[in-house]
């Protein structure tokens, strides 16, 4: 047989039946897929144990001779049991195998072998079920070295299914490793030397069949570095490609719109806002597209920074689009912009300013006529500013001269959506892009998920903010606190303030909260399947009870765009009879909603939310100069992990700190959602939280490789690793488009 390479189909190496089983269980089709199925853990075969001293449950390795072998049919089930009795001269032990009749050929009486596994008892007899077996070839029966090598070996345990056992996987891998030819290494020689990591073939052999812990460590280091490195090369290439694309340079700074906006700002920009504004201005003035991530804590004033950039671009003759994750947020941005611009937002209309421009709004729930009118303004260029939701990405939306795209609260948008928007500029030109995160993100995440972007960070909050006082309210343990909490809500309203009440679900027929996933694990500890509070029932109960007499409204995803809009308006602006004083809502208010007069937020069943989400929700209050309050209601008992998370949120308002903690508690997949980066499936050993140093090193190496050789002609191994990685992202895109 020809030596196998990584791209070869498994069916040609391990046989059709095994290949089919592996594909069905794990979706593996190639040799590479199989070899990248790394063991979950390893067990030491342990030192040789004497048969007379076997303890139930112990993991042992014995050296023994096969005495007799029997195969019989099972009585209750289909299948066979093979039993081999082995002896070391003192005691005996049974080895049992289900449905492995073929072992008869191997386990012949008189042969000597090493058998490793865990001792169990069956009908009073000590046995090893499905032990690892190594039969010593005749003649080396007493070779102490061979025996020692076997005994010290680490036994791999693979992620397995009921149809494909760890043992079968190990077998298939053994076959593949033995037929493997020369492997092109994704890590070029010079990088490998600099980083002191071993080659690919050696690493694969050592991760699957480590002779000892040192070998295993070497293999893991190497493969972990490879994951980070290949990913960073993809990102570095993306950056390099973008840097080569043409964009219209927009010289911003002192146009009429931006000036009017600055004049109408009711506050001074922070130093950070000014500095980031300058970074953006420099990028915009270049004839290659900007790709910049603006990150900062909740309430740090990212939106203002983005709006100023947009106005600058319009002043310079282009159009700017602002993409918001929700309709509520899109409408809010639309209002902020039109009200700050005043007559300047009435460009082209009677009574409008001659320097002005129109502001268009595009959302999914718009009536056709409205939408058509807005689309016309966009395509004609009359609308310099276009605000919208996903609806903005659709094919029907064409711009006259799209100069800047701002994506607010990035975590809802993936690389592919960015790409779709980028295609909307004129001809070959690309728009400049600003991405804003909802919450701060840890450095390693910035480098992996957003590694193709330049990063600007707003480190300070605007002056005069009172930190939001946060308290955990244990509903069961301290009912008095609950009453006190609602009394506080009433006090806020009496003082003319607004209050949010957030619930995990909409109605009682709503099976579970959209964000329940993260928390379910933790909740297990309470041992009961309680359902989370819903907007509808909480609003009803409050109106009849604790908050009777107050004006209570609701806001959730099942309302139409118009209804949501109306609720937000009545909550945010109204002081008349139709006002809403307490808004009971789902997390639709999570991102970016800005009501400076809101001073309290009560989060019911707060344990159902993740840390970053709670921080984001809390950021809905404390946006003005008024002291604000966040109350986290929970039924979770003291000492549960869920409570610990809430205590952490209560203990600090530092979003960067909480983001790090959140990351540590989440599974990686949640952080690196595949639509974000198209890379999730490539990370097996790398852990974004723990492996910061690996990521930093890999990034540096990747940047210098790509600089020296942008198309990677000199690194064929790397190139094919990238091709294996990137189609993923494209497939993802096709699925969603
Ligand atoms: P982010 O998007 O970063 O969460 P926003 O841009 O929505 O924050 O700003 C939060 C609130 O702070 C808004 O009410 C905004 O008007 C206000 N704000 C922004 N910049 C400043 C500043 N420099 N001084 C005072 N208030 C500010
Ligand atoms: Mg914002």
Image (cartoon, grey):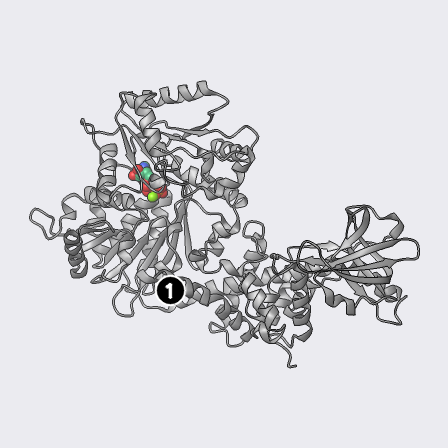
Q: Is residue 261 left or right of residue 88?
A: left
Ligand 1 is found in which quarter of the picture?
top left
Write the residue at 79% across / 64% down.
Answer: 134
Residue farthest right in this picture: 89
Tell whether circle 1 marks a residue whose Cβ is less than 8 angstroms from ligand 2. Answer: no
* Helix, strand or loop at mark 1: helix
Nearer the observer, 524 or 426: 524
- Residue 426 picture quarter: bottom left
Nearer the observer, 653 or 20: 20
Q: Is residue 244 visible?
A: yes
Where does the image place residue 571, in percent across and percent down from the top left? Answer: 25, 32
Picture quarter with the N terminus: bottom right
Q: Is residue 324 left or right of residue 730?
A: left
- Residue 146 picture quarter: bottom right
Where does the image place residue 425, in percent across and percent down from the top left? Answer: 27, 64
Q: Is residue 705 left or right of residue 18?
A: left
Write the residue at 90% across / 53% down.
Answer: 91
Identify the residue under disc 1. 734
| Up/down of 57 relative to 396, above or below | above
Picture quarter with the C terminus: bottom left
Residue farthest bottom in this picture: 2
Where does the image place residue 452, in percent across and percent down from the top left? Answer: 43, 60
Write the residue at 37% across / 32% down.
Answer: 465
Where does the image place residue 552, in percent across and percent down from the top left? Answer: 27, 28
Nearer the observer, 199 or 38: 38
| Up/down of 361 relative to 636, above or below | below
Numbered marks: total: 1
Label 1 crowding class (10 Å Cα cut-off): few <14, some 14-19, many 20+?
A: few
| Up/down of 146 relative to 382, above or below | below
């Amino acid at each position: 047989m020809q030596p196998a390479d990584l791209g070869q189909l498994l069916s040609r190496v391990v046989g059709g039946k095994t290949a089919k089983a592996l594909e069905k269980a794990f979706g593996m089709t190639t040799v590479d897929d199989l070899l990248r199925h790394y063991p979950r853990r390893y067990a030491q075969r342990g030192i040789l144990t004497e048969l007379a001293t076997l303890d139930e449950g112990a993991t042992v390795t014995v050296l023994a001779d096969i005495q007799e072998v029997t195969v019989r049919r099972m009585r209750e089930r289909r299948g066979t049991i093979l039993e081999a009795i082995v002896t070391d001269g003192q005691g005996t032990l049974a080895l049992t195998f289900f449905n492995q009749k073929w072992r008869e050929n191997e386990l012949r009486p008189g042969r000597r072998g090493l058998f490793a596994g865990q001792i169990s008892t069956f009908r009073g007899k000590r046995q090893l079920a499905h032990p690892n077996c190594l039969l010593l070839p005749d003649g080396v029966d007493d070779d102490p070295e061979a025996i020692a090598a076997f005994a010290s070996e680490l036994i791999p345990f693979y992620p397995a299914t009921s149809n494909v056992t760890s043992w079968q996987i190990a077998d298939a891998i053994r076959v593949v490793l033995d037929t493997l030819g020369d492997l092109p290494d994704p890590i070029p020689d010079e990088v490998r030397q600099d980083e002191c990591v071993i080659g690919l073939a050696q690493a694969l052999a050592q991760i699957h069949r480590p002779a000892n812990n040192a070998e295993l460590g070497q293999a893991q280091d190497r493969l972990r570095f490879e994951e980070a490195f290949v990913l960073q090369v993809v990102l570095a290439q993306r950056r390099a490609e973008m840097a080569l694309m043409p964009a219209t340079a927009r010289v911003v700074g002192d146009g009429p719109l931006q000036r009017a906006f600055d004049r109408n700002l009711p506050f001074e920009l922070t130093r950070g806002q000014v500095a980031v504004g300058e970074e953006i201005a420099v990028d915009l003035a270049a004839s290659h597209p900007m790709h910049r991530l603006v990150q900062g804590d909740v309430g740090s004033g990212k939106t203002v920074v983005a709006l100023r950039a947009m106005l600058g671009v319009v002043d310079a003759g282009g159009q700017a689009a602002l993409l918001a994750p929700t309709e509520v947020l899109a409408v809010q941005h639309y209002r902020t912009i039109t009200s700050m611009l005043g007559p300047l937002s009435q460009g082209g209309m009677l009574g409008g300013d001659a320097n002005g421009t129109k502001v268009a709004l595009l959302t999914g729930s718009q009536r056709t006529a409205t939408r058509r009118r807005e689309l016309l303004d966009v395509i004609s260029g009359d609308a310099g500013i276009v605000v919208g939701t996903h609806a903005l990405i659709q094919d029907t939306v064409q711009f006259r001269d799209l100069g800047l795209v701002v994506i607010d609260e990035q975590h809802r948008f993936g690389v592919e959506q960015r790409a779709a928007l980028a295609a909307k500029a004129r001809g070959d030109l690309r728009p400049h892009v600003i991405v804003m995160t909802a919450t701060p993100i840890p450095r390693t995440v910035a480098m992996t998920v957003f590694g193709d972007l330049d990063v600007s960070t707003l480190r300070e909050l605007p002056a005069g903010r009172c930190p939001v006082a946060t308290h955990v309210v244990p509903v069961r343990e301290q009912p008095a606190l609950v009453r006190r909490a609602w009394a506080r809500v009433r006090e806020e309203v009496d003082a003319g303030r607004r209050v949010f009440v957030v619930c995990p679900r909409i109605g009682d027929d709503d099976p579970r909260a959209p964000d329940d996933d993260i928390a379910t694990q933790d909740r297990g500890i309470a041992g009961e399947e309680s359902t989370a509070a819903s907007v509808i029932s909480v609003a009803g109960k409050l109106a009849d009870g604790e908050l009777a007499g107050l004006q209570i409204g609701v806001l959730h995803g099942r309302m139409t765009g118009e209804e949501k809009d109306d609720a937000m308006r009545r909550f945010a602006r109204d002081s008349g009879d139709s006002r809403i004083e307490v808004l009971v809502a789902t997390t639709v208010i999570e991102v970016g909603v800005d009501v400076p007069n809101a001073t309290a937020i009560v989060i019911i069943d707060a344990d159902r939310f993740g840390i970053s989400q709670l921080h984001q929700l809390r950021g809905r209050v404390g946006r003005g100069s008024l002291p604000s309050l966040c109350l986290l209601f929970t039924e979770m008992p003291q000492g549960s992990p869920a409570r610990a998370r809430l205590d952490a949120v209560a203990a600090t308002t530092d979003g960067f700190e909480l983001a790090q903690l959140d990351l540590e508690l989440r599974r990686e997949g949640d952080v690196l959602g595949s639509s974000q980066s198209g890379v999730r499936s490539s990370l097996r050993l790398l852990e974004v939280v723990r492996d910061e140093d690996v990521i930093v090193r890999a990034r540096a190496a990747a940047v210098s490789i790509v600089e020296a050789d942008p198309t990677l002609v000199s690194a064929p191994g790397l190139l094919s690793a990238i091709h294996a990685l990137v189609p993923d992202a494209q497939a993802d895109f096709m699925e969603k488009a």
